[in-house]
Image: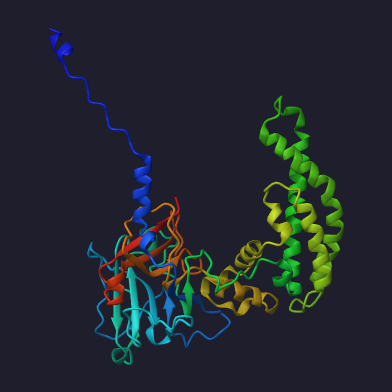
């Protein structure tokens, strides 16, 4: 009765997976091999909140400005798409190095871009119809943006005016046309208000770590024997900190008191700040990567986070009049810095996406941005890609919408 077992064919051996071939195919799908090494692009620079917004003719988020007969685009599922961008085509100046204009777009009128979960729509409104255009409301059936996976329960992305700036894009994460503004803290900590906030955050960070160090050594009797790698790292860090931090605190505390007593908008004592930064760096170089380490150098991200928390109502309402003069230059620089938003150009390769981009170039790219509510848990941006010849001929409707996967 078990004869069939003896006669059964053995399963065929599966073909081995050619990893190199898979990697080669993934690389080919990026399209980078045939893409130009540099392309004209137009950065969409967020406008300063301390400049008038009423005159803005280009913006991201909110709702569009269109003639009354405009029909709001629907996605393939029949639901309204979310408005992403309106660009004044007359404001797109030629790229200075090549003299190129945006390919396939008229020299006047408005470009409107809408996106959904997997699809998009582009509308171009000519200059004549834009003269009778007005702000139109979002459809009542428009889902909140969190249904697309973005943070927030608003119906639309946050509106923010932009000013298009032409540049020659070479595919860098940060184009050379927009140099790093915050590399040297001696350059951007330029008012007493910023010096006070920087010193306060560092004081809090050092004092917190010293408390953690005391608690850590108080539990020494309970350390495993032999100590784990993590225990040894913490022992080295807290030993260094408890030995050297008190001397730095002795100088940092009076500096903070001085900064707090000076006029907030006044120019900082650059020589005194520079000397203190030298001492901070000297202590930092012996540190592993603990949270206090960036504060030792002067962290623009930490200051930005503290200001956004302190003035959360101003940021939420995009009403920045409550922000004091002493930190306005810093806030303005952070907002109007390169944030990754642009028309055309070269999008750096996606590390976690696999869409086939051969023969295509990016049309518009909007990155994750807390000011626009375009942040999500799994994406670091979104973009629309079209065939290169399609872009040149103004065919912006038959491309693909891509969410930039963060994981």
| Residue found 50% across the figure and 84% down from its top | 53
| Residue found 80% across the figure and 61% down from its top | 278
Q: Is residue 390 left or right of residue 204?
A: left
Q: Residue 78, image x and y in percent?
A: 22, 65
| Residue found 80% across the figure and 67% down from its top | 274
Q: Is residue 78 above or below residue 4?
A: below
Give the number of callouts: 0
Q: Is residue 30 visible?
A: yes
Quadrant in the rendering for residue 404: bottom left
Q: Residue 157, image x and y in percent?
A: 42, 69
**Considering depth in this image, is 191 or 221 the residue closer to the camera?**
191
**Considering depth in this image, is 394 or 309 the residue closer to the camera?**
394
Quadrant in the rendering for residue 237: top right
Q: Is residue 135 visible?
A: no
- Quarter the N terminus occupies: top left
Q: Is residue 330 left or right of residue 375?
A: right
Q: Residue furthest top?
A: 1
Q: Is residue 193 above or below residue 222?
A: below
Q: Residue 160, image x and y in percent?
A: 47, 76
**Considering depth in this image, is 340 or 359 the residue closer to the camera?**
359
Q: Residue 365, image x and y in percent?
A: 41, 68
**Considering depth in this image, is 310 or 220 the residue closer to the camera?**
220
């Amino acid at each position: 009765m078990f004869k069939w077992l003896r006669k059964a064919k053995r399963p065929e051996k599966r073909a081995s997976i050619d990893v190199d071939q898979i990697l080669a195919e993934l690389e080919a799908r990026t399209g980078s091999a045939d893409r130009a090494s540099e392309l004209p692009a137009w950065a969409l620079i967020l406008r300063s909140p301390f400049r008038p917004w009423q005159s803005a003719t280009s913006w991201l988020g909110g709702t569009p400005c269109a003639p009354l007969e405009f029909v709001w685009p629907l996605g393939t599922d029949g639901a309204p798409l979310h408005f992403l961008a309106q660009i004044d085509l007359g404001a797109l100046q030629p790229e200075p190095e090549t003299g190129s204009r945006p390919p396939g777009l008229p020299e006047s009128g408005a470009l409107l871009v809408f996106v959904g979960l997997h699809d998009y729509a582009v509308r171009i409104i000519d200059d004549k119809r834009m003269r009778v255009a007005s702000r139109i409301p979002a459809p009542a059936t428009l889902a909140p943006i969190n249904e697309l996976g973005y943070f927030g329960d608003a119906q639309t992305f946050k509106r923010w005016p932009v000013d298009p700036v032409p540049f020659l894009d070479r595919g860098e994460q940060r184009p050379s046309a927009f140099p790093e503004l915050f590399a040297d803290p001696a350059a951007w900590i330029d008012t007493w208000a910023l010096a006070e906030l920087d010193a306060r955050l560092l004081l809090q960070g050092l004092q917190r770590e010293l408390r953690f160090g005391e608690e850590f050594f108080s539990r020494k009797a309970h350390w495993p024997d032999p100590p784990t790698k993590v225990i040894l790292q913490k022992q080295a860090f807290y030993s260094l900190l408890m030995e050297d931090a008190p001397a730095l605190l002795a100088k940092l505390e009076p500096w903070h008191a001085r900064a707090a007593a000076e006029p907030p908008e006044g120019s900082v004592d650059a020589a005194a700040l520079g000397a203190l930064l030298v001492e901070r760096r000297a202590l930092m170089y012996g540190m592993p990567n603990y949270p206090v380490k960036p504060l030792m150098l002067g962290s623009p991200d930490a200051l930005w986070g503290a200001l956004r928390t302190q003035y959360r109502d101003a940021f939420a309402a995009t009403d920045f009049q409550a922000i004091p003069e002493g930190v306005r230059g810093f806030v303005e620089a952070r907002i109007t810095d390169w944030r990754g938003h642009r028309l055309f150009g070269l999008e750096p390769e996606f590390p976690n996406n696999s869409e086939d981009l051969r023969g295509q170039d990016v049309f518009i790219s909007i990155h994750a941005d807390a000011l626009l509510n375009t942040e999500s848990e799994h994406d670091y941006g979104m973009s629309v890609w079209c065939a290169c010849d399609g872009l040149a001929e103004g065919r912006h409707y038959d491309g693909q919408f891509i969410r930039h996967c963060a994981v």
